Amino acid sequence: MIIFPAIDIKEGKVVRLLQGKFDEVTQYGEDPVDMARHWESKGAQWLHLVDLDGAQTGEIRNLDVIVNIAKTVNIPVQMGGGIRTKEDIEKLINGGVSRVILGTKIVEDRNFLKEILDIWKEKIAVSLDCHNGMVAQRGWTSTSNLKATEFAKELQGLGLTCLIYTDIARDGMLSGPNFESLKELLETVQIPIIASGGVANLEDIKKLSSLESDGLIGAITGKAIYEGKLDLEEALQLLNNAN
């Protein structure tokens, strides 16, 4: 299982939101590139980048910073937030991003997913951001009438190869992941899944790693590693020993 340190970028700074609320912002760093180097030096195998300004506006706003990170570190990065067009995806992939994460665009237009999977297949992921089992969109500011498990089945039918599951209510709360919903999703589809939201400590990492045989390939962590509740090196060592 891969642990993805999250670098959420807002106005060029490293921040975290509480439950995705744009008025509940905590800043953790001035320079996202320095932060990327920091997590790489601690042993991270991947980085998870989010353009929060992009998620809010529907247009990528921190492209230069994201490309700079991708070109600076020697580990792959995945990125989401504000990606709406093929041109956006092309710019990111040409800029060194290894996996592009889509959300709102796919909720609104499944044909777009079919088109881009034909071109970029393994380089595309969809973020399933959920509130009470329903899919949220537009930077988590609105909830659709789509049930998460039904949407996931649809995505599987279209040939998606990576799904990121976030429980919005847990995000930034350090209350532990929503294991019940995660297990339900793992039982529903065969798409490899990355869990996000609520990771608080080493015990959570241990429990998540027990779901690896069910199709969980990774976990994203943000607040826990920024506030010292979870030591990244210790977590990586735990997974290394387990293997």
Image (spheres, rainbow, N blue to C red):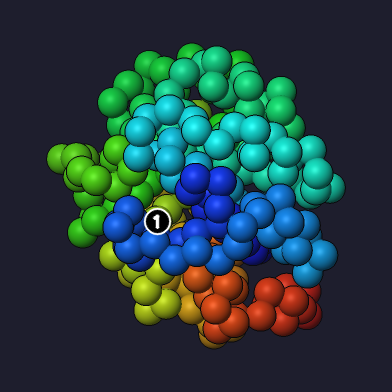
In the figure, 3 relative to 147: above or below?
below
Residue 201 location (% of width, % of height): 54, 82
Residue at horizontal 60%, vertical 51%?
A: 48
On the image, numbered disc 1 is attached to which residue?
166
Seen from the viewer's position, the closer of residues 174 and 13 is: 13
Residue 109 location (% of width, % of height): 32, 21
In the figure, 207 relative to 155: above or below?
below
In the figure, 131 relative to 210: above or below?
above
Assign the N terminus to one quadrant of the image: bottom right
> Can residue 125 be seen here?
no
Assign the C terminus to one quadrant of the image: bottom right
Q: Is residue 209 left or right of residue 241?
A: left
Residue at horizontal 62%, vertical 43%?
A: 78
Residue at horizontal 56%, vertical 57%?
A: 14
Quarter of the image for residue 64 reads top right
In the figure, 99 relative to 48: above or below?
above
Seen from the viewer's position, the closer of residues 44 and 34 is: 34
Residue 213 location (% of width, % of height): 59, 63
Look at the numbered disc 1 and give the secondary structure of its residue. Answer: strand
The total number of labels drawn is 1
Check the image and name the residue furthest to the left.
145
For the residue marked with disc 1, what is the amino acid? Thr
Quarter of the image for residue 203 reads bottom right
Residue 104 location (% of width, % of height): 34, 33
Residue at horizontal 32%, vertical 53%?
A: 22
> Can residue 124 be seen here?
yes
**Pointer 1: residues within 10 angstroms few (<14), some, or many (20+)?**
many
Seen from the viewer's position, the closer of residues 25 and 97 is: 25
Q: Is residue 57 left or right of residue 31?
A: left
Q: Is residue 163 left or right of residue 99?
A: left
